[in-house]
Image (cartoon, helix red, strand yellow):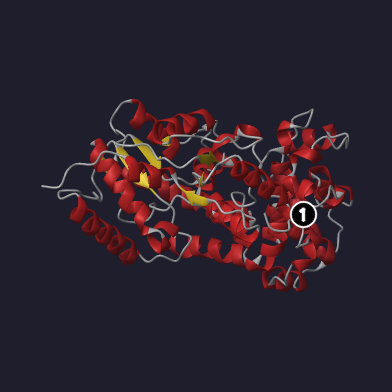
Amino acid sequence: MAETNKDTAKGEELDEGIEVGVHRLTPERIQTVINSVLGAETGARFKAYIQTCIHCGLCSDACHFYLSNDKDPRFSPVGKVKQTIWPMIESKGRVDADFIRRAAQIAHTECNLCKRCVQYCPFGIDIAYMMSMVRRIIHKLGVTPLYLQDTAHSHAATMNQMWVKGDEWIDTLQWQEDEAREEIPGLRIPLEKEGADIMYSVIAPEPKFQAQLIYQAAVIMHTAGVNWTMPAGMGWDNSDMAMFSGDNEIMGRVKRAHFDAAERLKVKKIVMGECGHAFRSVYDMGNRWLGWAMPPIPIVHAIEFYHDLLKTGRIRIARKYDKPVTLHDPCNVVRGGGLHEMARYVVSQICEELVEMHPNREHNYCCAAGGGVINCGPPYKNKRMAGNRVKAEQLFDAKSRGAQTLIAPCHNCHSGLHDIIHHYEIGLDIKFFGDIIYECMEKPESP
């Protein structure tokens, strides 16, 4: 592995979104927004966390940013709270613009809302929730990092995060259907099929940059004999960058469009592609903002979908993937959804050998991607890489024990891990479950 400590937080570049926003602030606006959010958008849960924390610091060793930055207490979970929300409360909102600038950097680029620290707090205090309230205040003050805000704007204007136009979405599906029919004649990507069993939804980077994933999903659906469809209009993108930026109003609009599409098509359930933050947005955050404790229509992540297809024999494996693999447990679907054993069942059915990372399952280290840090863009890449040093060491350990391929069943994790592997020169190939299933499954023979 290459030198692990060649970058520091000092490698950070100027963020126009934060700087322009900070210069527009006034003391009165800062105080009004902070007190408004804390007074109207928090309740007993938030109050209990504030009053219960005894500053013991047992959360510190759970945080990869703290461990990767030589246990600098400023990067500990409790240290981040002490630099952000606590002074806001104690001063009743009387903090200055420089404080807000630093709070924005901490909440958006030094905490990935991964919730690993929650498991190590003796009182179960959810510091990720507290940092999300800081992000909410930062959003309402107009100080969100520029790259993240741009994707949230895309959601507001197009209801997808990549500015994909309506005709581009349809054209991409048609293109992938045509390509797949050359391999499997008769295959369809059904659009607007009312009463199908499943609505399959993806995130916008798939039609924009990774259309082969839609191709592979279509082959899997066709081979398994699934009665499925995809929406032709708004609601096809299940991602939600507004959830990360603290723009709860846009988050709610995006999730409403998603659920409305499934309801309009009268499907029995929604199956999502391999994305962790999108799962969190429909299974935990967006649905609750809209008033549903659970999604109004059953939602299944791709891990569970593949698990069921393999277990029932609807997908059969012609030959297992023969390179040793290691498995990254995405925070949003493992700590957030408990899918770690299902993921291991899928690995056991499609791969010859699994080399476990340590720690693993719900104790796995975050990759600083699935909670929005990666979406703050290039100004923070060096800082993010420095904060991923322990993740790099974890990956290198799996590599040294024989792993050649890293499975990451989450889009954001995929991107974050790609950066880590490249930066630290670890030398692992990265794949989704869908890549390996498509490669190894039995497919209908061409006539």
Q: Is residue 422 visible?
A: yes
Left or right: residue 268 versus residue 333 is: left
Left or right: residue 2 versus residue 238 is: right
- Disc 1 crowd, CA 10 A, few/some/many (<14, 14-19, 20+): many
Q: Nearer the viewer, residue 104 or 341?
A: 341
Please identify the residue farthest to the left as the structure is shown: 447
Q: In x, y percent, where is residue 275?
A: 48, 47
Q: In x, y percent, where is residue 136?
A: 68, 53
| SS of the residue under disc 1 | helix
Residue at horizontal 59%, vertical 45%? Answer: 399
Residue at horizontal 47%, vertical 65%? Answer: 157
Q: Quadrant of the N terminus?
A: bottom right
Q: In x, y percent, where is residue 6?
A: 76, 62
Q: Is residue 144 visible?
A: no
Q: Nearer the viewer, residue 224 or 167?
A: 224
Asked which quadrant contains residue 232, the reply is bottom left
Q: Nearer the viewer, residue 33 or 339?
A: 339
Residue at horizontal 49%, vertical 31%? Answer: 344
Q: Nearer the viewer, residue 310 or 261?
A: 310
Q: Which residue in the protein does label 1 denote?
A: 34
Asked which quadrant contains residue 126, the reply is top right
Q: Amino acid at mark 1?
A: Ile
Q: In x, y percent, where is residue 249?
A: 56, 53
